[in-house]
Image (cartoon, rainbow, N blue to C red):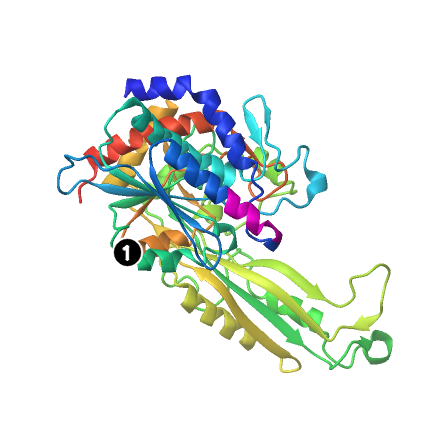
Amino acid sequence: MQPLFDYLAANEQRHIAQLCDYVRFPSVSAQAAHAGDLKRCAEWLAGHCRGIGLEARLFPTKGNPILVARTPRPKAARKGRRHYIVYGHYDVQPPEPLDLWRTKPFEPTIVGRRLYGRGASDNKGQNFAHLKGVEAYLKTGTELPCDITFVIEGEEEVGSSSLAGFLKARRKELACDAVVISDTGIPSLRHPALTYGLRGIAALEVRVDGPSRDLHSGIYGGSLDNPAMVLSQILARMKDARGRVTIPGFYDDIAPLTAYERKQLARLPFDAAAYRKFLGVPALNGEKGFTPIEQRSARPTFEINGLTSGYQGQGSKTIVPAWASAKITLRLVPGQKPSKILRAAADWIRKVAPPTVKVTVDPGHSGDPYLVSPTGPLAQAGLRALEQAFGHAPFLMREGGSIPIVNDFKRILNADTLLLGLALPDDNLHSPNEKFDLDCFTRGTRMSALLWKELASGVTR
């Protein structure tokens, strides 16, 4: 491996400059005005892949192009040679609010060992680290021990609507032993981690309709139910004093944390006072009987994401509003099925609502939870690569967020996913002043170079 490490060290500054070029594209998938920027970003990425020796092709979709870039297959490749997919995305979140940025979001700025810019961490820097790890093999003439295909899309931040169909249409050529994704995080440079579980998600919107129009609260108030008050009362009944969701059957199918998992999660570095300060809250609170790490990564939730009702302008307007609405998401853990939870939630909301108003529950997007065995050969190969690259014993963790595409890889390609994140907790993903730690980037390139050897030698079909 030493020639690979020497190459990566010698070319580190060039690789960082190329990453800056990548981040410079304002590839915001949520905003139609950036459609051209997304296309240009995809074309730049395809050209870059060809430049390092990959066979790259852009596939048009109804949305943004999907890049597929493959390592050249050796002429004497043996039958049964393993094949892995590296998944990433080149689209980014909108940069707004712009006034909160200390640097311009699409003018990459390096301060010390930090690269600031929208998409630097989510996900351009992370998928670029894998490209550089593979580049080291190709440019030094070192034979790769397996075949690698990069699948990098431009719609992840808006739901990956084109990718599932793309995978189905090319199921045979994309058949693989596993998928590698670096789109999660680690606690610190001294605490590299493998994410073996993701929470799923189920979204819904609740609307409460009362009078046919806004009414004068002095003349009519007190003689009818106020939709904003009713909605507040309904939502207040969704959790009890112990922080548990009250929806009947909500916890029935959950696969409980094993003693081994709780022990591993307890190893993660955690300072409750520092965490509370980081969040900016007076005190922490969550489901009783579980640690904050478990609460935010391995337990299900019921969250109100938005509330709307009545007058929102300056000053007062004395009305009984005609309606009220709430946007809600439930984070789910392995064992829970989004469709079942959505039905149960809608039934419970309607049941606790009074007959004095009309309640409508509209289901939204959803995604299954994901879990791969933390003791299996796939995870163990990832842990070995992490330890060698970072120089510290890695941790096992669950991620509180959701990456629905991992379930598409499992359902369509029958491939498990190895989640090897490189983002730090203060990287400000989806927020102003997003950054990527360049030490994470360089160690990520080494981790990627090491990973293919570990996967090829330590994972059986």
Residue 96 lies, in percent from the top left, at: 66, 46
Residue 357 lies, in percent from the top left, at: 66, 80
Q: Residue at x 60, y 57 (%)?
A: 305
First to last magenta residue range: 33-40
Residue 145: name its quadrant: top left
Residue 278 lies, in percent from the top left, at: 61, 36
Q: Is residue 355 left or right of residue 245?
A: right
From the viewer's perspective, is residue 433 above or below residue 331?
Answer: above
Magenta-colored stretch includes residue 36: yes
Magenta-colored stretch includes residue 234: no
Q: Nearer the viewer, residue 274 or 170?
A: 170
Q: How many marks?
A: 1
Q: Residue at x 23, y 36 (%)?
A: 146
From the viewer's perspective, is residue 218 above or below residue 273?
Answer: below
- Image quarter where the C terminus lies is top left
Residue 377 lies, in percent from the top left, at: 23, 39
Give the residue type at disc 1.
Arg
Q: Is residue 140 left or right of residue 130?
A: left
Q: Residue at x 43, y 37 (%)?
A: 47
- Image quarter where the N terminus lies is top left
Q: Residue at x 25, y 36 (%)?
A: 455
The residue that disc 1 covers is 171
Q: Is residue 227 left or right of residue 219?
A: left
Q: Nearer the viewer, residue 172 or 103?
A: 172
Is residue 28 something that shows in the picture? no
Is residue 163 something that shows in the picture? yes
